[in-house]
């Protein structure tokens, strides 16, 4: 298989973790006889510094000529006081909107070797295995009017039926490949958009009689993610709720440094990035955990290229390295061997070559 | 002191827990020489059943003639399919708006005797001691337009400078009576309302040079409440974020059944209610934990009536009963003596009489 991948390292630890993922992709290419053309381009604060634009046109061009996007991370205090259009995050918001990446998919799975790092009691966090499906290109993030005056400010939460339908369908499809349960999260006792959301879920479920459906209010969901996270399989929700709940979910198993994400379009094109941020404090020190970026590359192989065997090989290699006790500093603990970013990647590649 | 208190028992376990709080108030009245006139009125599903209105005019009248409101809980599956204007929650939303109860105050404090019930590791949850200050009468809950058509729906997130100022001032004032730190939570990298919010916090802090101020994005806050809840002192945020974060915070210490809340107006008038819901499954069984309602009554004495000694006496009595090992079923565990609602109240009243 021949594929072109846009690599957008971004800021902070972004470059080192995307480098790591690229090494793993290269090893996969060799072993399975694929060709991955990698085209690097700038995004985020780095792009602001170089091009005065967090998502320059040449980056969009590179992505348009590619089959998928691998992103590191964007952001850093350096750019925090920039005006909105020159902020790193704006690059992320723009790329989502430009490529219509409406479905953000975030698996959260407990890794037995890492439960000691979880803030939750082991009996609460163990066996957690859920996917959060967040609508990513509508809602409060993009709704108009969105403006302010001296005396007030307004944002608009708007959803069309079609926007809800496609994300809900996505969740149902994912549930079919898993335990067959969808939890739809809304605030239907207060919001009109949530009432429409709930209605659409009720309509769409008719096409998925095999899937169990549950509606949950966002405040209850925020509690249940902590008290009883194992009850979730696929969680589907709108943009703002998804932002909050997926970050909340990302810390419950203690493996934030391991979590990948995909932001995809209907045709399979997608952007893949680690859930963790740019961590400027440890950037350039060969300390960052590259697992999330590597696992994001695995998600790309699976979702965008249909390379399931290759994706599974990467996932297994990462888990094996962790089970052998190797980890980066963020996961250090009793009986663990703390290694550098480079060494961790080398270990993963060795595992891949051994398999 | 002579005060009139509107008692709105509401639905589910609401009546039994407000009864409990009333007994404690009566004991306080006797011991400290106060007169509390208690006027009962209907709200929520019970009011829908009786008056076809979740907040009947006669209830509003009773509250207007009172110095404070004590509420049990509203809601229940029985009314879940009612049209919006006949749903129990509507009673709550209407009473908040009618009385301009703009500041929702929710203390979350770890109780050593209950840490075993927390989903968090003891070393994470112990010593948690924060207050969440949520704006309660504006934002997405009430903003116009708020409507739907066949093909789409819209809600509006709007804030005026004055609305933000008064809630932020409230948070600063509370911080002065505590550890002197305010964490303002927003989504300033995406929302216009959040940018205004942040600006107002920056302006208001000038009047409170003694208070440490920190800004936090709502997604980060959702993580930090789990990974590092001890870092929070006073958290201030807008209505929808506050709904989510305060419920999230309510489960971290394992003492949800103990948490009181206040929803207050600028002049000190306020509505006091337990954070827990109406729990219809255990209603009428003399099993409900009355601690949250009792502690809500204590908050009323403090905030609305300035009776600090009396409030402290109630708080101490409840803690003493818990430390003696007595608790209701929701907190049952090793070395605990599970007692009924009535028995728990009797114990608290005995402690009060002993002090
Ligand atoms: C950087 C920010 C705009 C972004 C979001 O809120 O969507 C981030 O928090 C995320 O979840 O990817
Ligand atoms: C019942 C509901 C409308 C209410 C809210 O969202 O404000 C509740 O969740 C709360 O937090 O008091």
Image: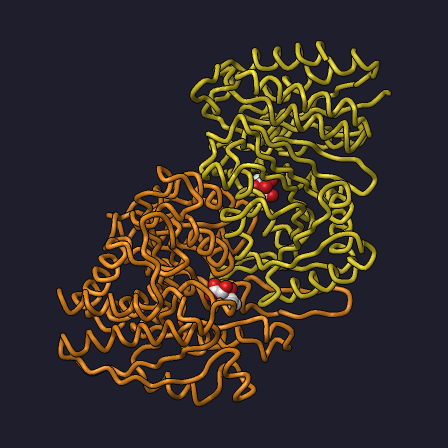
Chain colours: A yellow, B orange
Q: Where residue A321 sits: x, y (%)?
A: 59, 17
Q: Position of residue B129 (x, y in %)?
A: 31, 49
| Residue for point 70% across, 38% down | A263
Residue B107: quadrant of the picture: bottom left
Is residue B5 visible to the viewer in this orientation of the structure? yes
**Residue A174 occupies quadrant:** top right
Q: Nearer the viewer, residue B279 or B273?
A: B279
Left or right, A75 with reference to B267: right
- Is A185 in front, or is B281? B281
- As drawn, B152 above or below A290: below
| B349 horizontally vs B203: left or right | left
Q: Position of residue A94 (x, y in %)?
A: 67, 41
Q: Quadrant of residue B272?
A: bottom left
Q: Is A283 in front, or is B279?
A: B279
**Where the C terminus of chain A falls, by quadrant?**
top right
Q: Residue at x 69, y 36 (%)?
A: A262
Asked if B241 appears above or below B299 in the picture, the reply is above
Q: Is residue A12 left or right of residue B182?
A: right
């Amino acid at each position: 298989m021949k594929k072109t991948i846009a690599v957008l390292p971004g800021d902070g630890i972004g470059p080192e973790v995307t480098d790591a993922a690229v090494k793993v992709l290269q090893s996969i290419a060799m072993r399975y006889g694929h060709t991955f053309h990698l085209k690097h381009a700038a995004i985020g604060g780095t792009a602001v510094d170089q091009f005065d634009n967090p998502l320059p046109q040449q980056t969009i061009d590179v992505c348009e000529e590619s089959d998928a996007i691998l992103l590191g991370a964007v952001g850093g205090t350096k750019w925090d006081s920039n005006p909105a259009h020159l902020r790193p995050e704006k690059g992320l918001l723009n790329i989502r909107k430009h490529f219509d990446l409406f479905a953000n998919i975030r698996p959260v799975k407990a890794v037995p070797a890492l439960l000691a790092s979880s803030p939750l009691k082991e009996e609460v966090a163990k066996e957690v295995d859920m996917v959060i499906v967040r609508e990513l290109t509508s809602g409060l993030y993009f709704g108009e009017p969105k403006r302010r005056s001296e005396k007030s400010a307004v944002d608009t939460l708007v959803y069309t039926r079609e926007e809800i339908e496609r994300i809900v369908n996505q969740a149902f499809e994912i549930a079919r490949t898993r335990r067959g349960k969808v939890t739809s999260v809304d605030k239907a006792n207060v919001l009109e958009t949530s009432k429409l959301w709930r209605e659409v879920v009720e309509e769409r479920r008719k096409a998925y009689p095999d899937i169990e459906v549950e509606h949950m209010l966002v405040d209850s969901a925020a509690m249940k993610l902590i008290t009883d996270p194992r009850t979730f399989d696929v969680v589907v929700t709108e943009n703002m709720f998804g932002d909050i709940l997926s970050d909340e979910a990302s810390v419950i198993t203690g493996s934030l440094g391991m979590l990948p994400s995909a932001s995809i379009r209907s045709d399979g094109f997608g952007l893949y990035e680690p859930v963790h941020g740019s961590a400027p404090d440890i950037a350039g020190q060969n300390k960052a955990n590259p697992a999330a970026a590597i696992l994001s590359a695995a998600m790309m192989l699976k979702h965008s290229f249909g390379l399931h065997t290759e994706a599974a090989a990467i996932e297994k290699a990462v888990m094996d390295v962790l089970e052998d006790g190797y980890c980066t500093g963020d996961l250090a603990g009793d009986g663990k061997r703390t290694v550098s970013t480079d060494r961790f990647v080398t270990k993963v590649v060795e595992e891949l070559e051994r398999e």
